[in-house]
Image (cartoon, grey):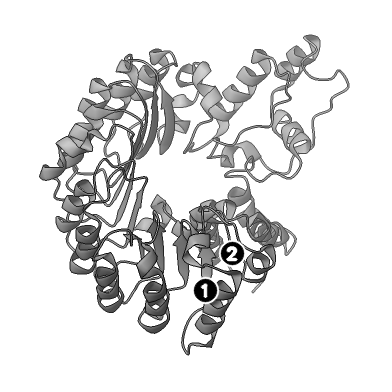
Amino acid sequence: MSKLNHDILYEIFQNLQDLININSNYLENSNKEINYKGFKRSQFSCLLVNKSWCEVMIPFLWSNPFKYGYMKSPLFETIISHLSDNSIKILKDKNIIRANFQKLKLSFNYIRFCKYFHDLHIFPVDSKMLLKEEIYKLFISECSSIKCLNSDMAHYPISKYPGANISLSNLYEIYCSNTIDQDFYYGLAQICRSIEEIYVRIYNEESSGIAELIEMQKQIKYVFIDGFYECKKITQALEKHANSIIHLETTKYTSVIHFLIPKLINLRYLKVNDNYCELKKYVIYLNHYNLQVLDLCFLPSLDIAINIIKNTNGNLWKIRIENTKYYDKAKEYNQKIHKYCPNIKYVTVFLNRDGTLEELEKIFIKCQHLEAIYIDDEIKHEYIDKFLNLLLELAPLTLCKIHISYIDRCFNTNESLELFLINWDHHKGKKTLHLYSNYIKINKDIVDKYDIKDFWNDYFMGMDKYNSY
């Protein structure tokens, strides 16, 4: 194993790195950072095998050393050791770094391997602009292929630094804000053509530089919009990428973005979190046959979700509906799940209106890939016992996660809850059950014994681009 050639080692380490990148968001959100650090420790141990392993592993470890650097001070000293002697002298003369600082003897030009800078937080709290400028110039001149920038870099003219045409030419991901001088984005627009993932925060109507940057890209795939202001220029720029956008998240009031949604014919992931939900004006035009994940919050009516679901092509496998204002179409919504979503794994269902339980029974029968259900709102009192029996007798064997908003109202006593959990465990073929609830008002001993959680985001584990397609 230790004598594998460089090419084979590179493939192995690349696959390991991809695995880490795919799972990092989930592990962090699920409080499993220790497991993730285990991945990192495995990588560090590879450095000690022999010289060949070390040479292959260094580029991977230094592609994003800032996010999981255990000691930021040594990392900072390693980075500034790459600066020229003249830069070090200037920084010393201006008392920006300590007078007795000695550059480290470096085995590699580590900076050239850096690609991801969104977690760049190595600077001392009282860092001067000159220090940051020198380091940013270092990154731009030495890095061979930057994929993501740190938001603070937007305050510096990095597109004009020596080497920018090379280091920024493969930029993949960017966080934009129209509070930043638009010249920054105009500068990037002259260099970057490979951005696929863009986050935009809209605080005012000025966004011409961001729009220019979007227009100049070959294909935008992942779009995240946040803000109350209209953004017609950005919408018009995104319309150019209507065929390539597969992931869209929008929050707050951005009605012109909602106007764009029907044009995104290849959309696979749609998340709308909007108190005004202007989407209702355009929902009749939605035909997203490739849609896999639907996440809607603050719906005025379930009609919106119903119309989207019935105009998909059976590819939906995650549906989350939260904080709906009216539930009069709850039965029809449940009905559309078993009728149009045979591959559903994670889904919100309702048991707060007449006929909803009967439709849930059909979901259990027809949707045999079901892994998790989220019971939004309260359960009708007369449905509680039938629902619990349905879970035991008819739920697919794949079902292992249940979120009940008001779990204490579902189980009248602690004994009834414990009896249900015991019966579940005794059913042959049932997976270990994970219960979640927004409001836990039951015996703490039972909560601890059966690991009932009040943090339900884990229930929709992996609602992100890495686990969606």
Q: Where in the figure is residue 70, as x and y percent of width and height?
A: 74, 45
On the question of residue 21 being in view, the answer is no
Task: Measure the C-alpha gap from mark 1 to mark 2.
Answer: 10 Å
Residue at image location 36% in from the left, 62% down from the top: 380
Residue at image location 19% in from the left, 65% down from the top: 340
Q: Which residue is mark 1?
A: 433
Q: Residue furthest top?
A: 94
Q: Nearer the viewer, residue 137 or 35?
A: 35
Q: Which residue is mark 2?
A: 452
Residue at image location 15% in from the left, 57% down from the top: 310
The residue under label 1 is which amino acid type?
A: Leu
* Image position of 251 (left or right of 34): left
Quadrant including the N terminus:
bottom right
Q: Residue furthest bottom?
A: 428
The residue under label 2 is which amino acid type?
A: Ile
From the viewer's perspective, is residue 46 above or below residue 243? below
Q: Earlier in the sequence, mark 1 or mark 2?
A: 1
Q: How many marks?
A: 2
SS at badge 2: loop
From the viewer's perspective, is residue 469 above or below residue 223? below
On the question of residue 98 being in view, the answer is yes
